[in-house]
Image (tube, helix red, strand yellow):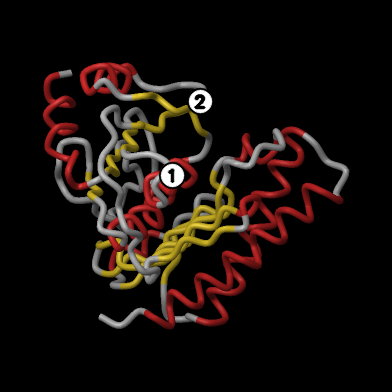
Amino acid sequence: MDLGDDIELARGIAAETGALLLRLRADSGLTGTALGARGDRAADDLILARLRAARPDDCILSEESHDDRARCAASRVWVIDPLDGTRDYAEGRDDWAVHIGLAVDGFPAAGVVGLPVLGRLHASDDPPLPRPPLPARPRMVVSRTRSAEVVTRVGAALGAELVGMGSAGAKAMAVVDGRAEIYLHAGGQYQWDNCAPAAVALAAGLHASRIDGTPLAYNGEDPLLPDLLICRKELAGAVLAAITAA
């Protein structure tokens, strides 16, 4: 499956969206929830316009737009979170992201995750990074504000260093770029929260699954996809066992 043109399209849209969001935060005069709401809408409008112009026959599932269930019969569905981490964005933090994923027959086949403040675009056609030896104490990225109890218990069982971070995309890319070894989430996500991150993580040679070890599947009728594990492959067995024990 050659998705090179799709990834290039997603890369360009993610870069444009990130630049728009940075300008809006710098120049709009808005703060707090008003800034977050404006950012969500502006980013969604831009991404949908670009995708509809370039891929008129594809379906789209976006956090910020009406969910047309006709997508469920489609093979190719773009799964997007125009501004992942709206609260972090509105608070002036750097750990928010732009997600543009493409599910093909339910599989997270391609994706780009932009981290605009850091000036980074992670894409599923990037060459895999060399992985250093595992540290004695793995680093596990978790929510800054509301980690589920199972996540805390698993971290303790693994002797992991817990690293608080904002959006799902920011946490997943910390594992992709080697700043952490494990990202475990339980307690509520949707397909747009993790489709693009999962596509990038899988392409980078990482493990990505549900927390029971089953594969991630997209474009189901219900957009809820409540849990996620992205980690170094060498740790997947230990993490999944700790989840079961927890």
Instruction: Say few, some or many: other residues with alpha carbon within 10 Å of mark 1 (under 14 / 14 to 19 / 20 or more).
Output: some
User: Is disc 1 placed on a helix, strand or loop?
Assistant: helix
Please tell me which residue lies in front, 127 or 213: 127
Q: Quadrant of the C terminus?
A: top left
Instruction: Say few, some or many: other residues with alpha carbon within 10 Å of mark 2 (under 14 / 14 to 19 / 20 or more).
Output: few
Q: Quadrant of the N terminus?
A: bottom left
Q: Quadrant of residue 229?
A: top left
- In the drawing, does residue 240 fall left or right of residue 35? left
Above or below, 109 against 93 in this view is below
Above or below, 8 against 196 in this view is below
Percent of width and height locating residue 244: 12, 25
User: What residue is rendered at 39% in x and 81% in y?
Assistant: 4
Task: Identify residue for label 1.
Answer: 174
User: What residue is rendered at 36% in x and 21% in y?
Assistant: 148
How many discs mark residues in the rendered view?
2
Above or below, 7 against 91 in this view is below
Please tell me which residue lies in front, 110 or 94: 94
Q: Quadrant of residue 158?
A: top left
Task: Identify residue for label 2.
Answer: 144
Please tell me which residue lies in front, 118 or 102: 118
User: Is disc 2 placed on a helix, strand or loop?
Assistant: loop
Mark 2 or 1: in front is 1
Disc 2 residue type (three-letter): Arg
Percent of width and height locating residue 188: 37, 33
